[in-house]
Image: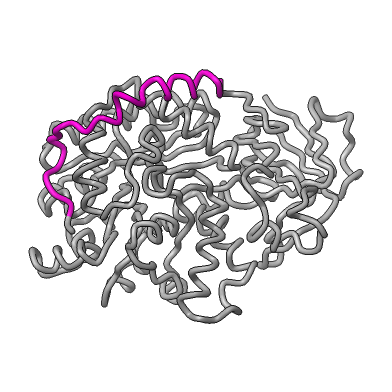
Amino acid sequence: MTNLLIKKCDVLSFAGGKAHVETKQDIAIQDESISAIEKTGTLQEGNFEQCIDAGGMLAVPGFINTHAHVPMVLFRNLAEDVTISEWFNDYIWPMESNLTEEDVYWGAQLGMAEMIENGITCVADHYFHMDEVAKAVEMAGMRANLVWAVFAHQGEEMLDKTIDFTRRWQGKADGRITTWLGPHAPYTTNPDFLKLCAQKAQKNGLGIHIHVSETAAQVDLSLKEYGITPVQQVRDCGILDVPTILAHVVDPRGEDFDILASHDTGIAQAPKTYLKSGMGLAPIHQYREHGIPFGLATDGAVSNNTLDIMEQMRLLALFGKYQTMDSTCMKLEELMEITFHGGAKVMHLPEKIGDLKPGMLADITLIRQDGLNSTPKANSLAYLLYCAKSSDVDTVLCNGKVLMQGRKLLTLDKARIQQEVQSRLQRLSQRMPNERIAFYPA
């Protein structure tokens, strides 16, 4: 049971409908939720079992990572300066053929530790051997939506195995774990398999997390094979009839925008991956015009090298301005809305996370504002978007529990994790024949 007071902090607030910062605030936490936010000195410190002095720090909702492949940190820096098809066919899938369950367990711990150090409290993860990832989430103390990636060639038997996983872990870790289904993508499945996924998701009360329209080549391939876009395909197969997270959607076309706007879905945006891989820029302004929710994502650390969500936030702002050649768009307040409220909507948790106010879950990140990069202290929103570094994250709470304080991880053994992962590098970096998938569209 938690009874905690965070005192003397500045608080990112959306009260009144527009992001702004309230100075000198105290945040009261009871069990897993925020019970009150008051001017410093209003709440009696003696009524709390634990106090965190956050004087001068900026309290923001825990950052939300709407799409990742967390254990892929195991392959960080091993696939550089190659085309997307080479990245998948010649590097990633051959290296992933080496993976064991224990590898995934330690890779997941490394990814969780890195995300906590970056102020991330919630992640949507799409990978393999997900029981091991769930164990890491339980230990780390984070919040997670977990899906076990499945391909059409693995058949219904493997799909049913992933459903068994959802039953084992749904609602576990004090409610921090949510489990859905994870068909990989339209180009690695087929319409019959997608229909089967949709039917089983509906039958079992599950959502779906899937990659869609990542590149123009994928969309062109879909049009050639089926006469419709990947977005239209997932609609026609019933995928959009359940809650969904769509990863990327970099190249929606035609009626895709209306389809996305009319279903219970959200889009995960990982701009560093798109820029680094030469994939193009997602039409984020059209998403906003159509009222389609989207949030920030890191993707895997092999495609962008870090799990730093503030880096993604900054890049989204910059390429949004670049797309329009308009320095007045993507204002500070808009980026706060996308980062926190948008991310919460994509995770289908808008009433629980993404805001600091009484009744919300106590997922909170405290960021120092006393560095050279924050001086002079003139505009906290501008500092957060354009100046703050991951190393400025001081303290992280999730579900009311302190996961890191004073940059010290409290739930994970950082040195042991680094040792375990490093010891696996030589074996995991070998590119072995793989049967997972035969082709990534060039």
Depth check, front residue: 223 or 383: 383
Q: Is residue 417 magenta?
A: yes
The one of 75 and 332 positioned closer to us in this rendering = 75
Q: Name the quarter where the N terminus is drawn.
A: top right
Q: Quadrant of residue 234?
A: bottom left
Image location of residue 43, percent across then percent down: 87, 40
Q: In the picture provided, is 355 more to the left or to the right than 71?
A: right
Q: Is residue 121 left or right of residue 280?
A: right
Left or right of 102 on screen, residue 30? right
Q: Is residue 390 left or right of residue 133?
A: right
Q: Quadrant of residue 256?
A: bottom left
Which residue range is magenta in the image? 413-440
Residue at x-position 73% and y-position 54%: 373
**What residue do we see at 83% from left, 40% from top?**
7
Q: Nearer the viewer, residue 322 or 46?
A: 322
Which residue corresponds to the image point at 61% horizontal and 72% vertical from the top-left? 331
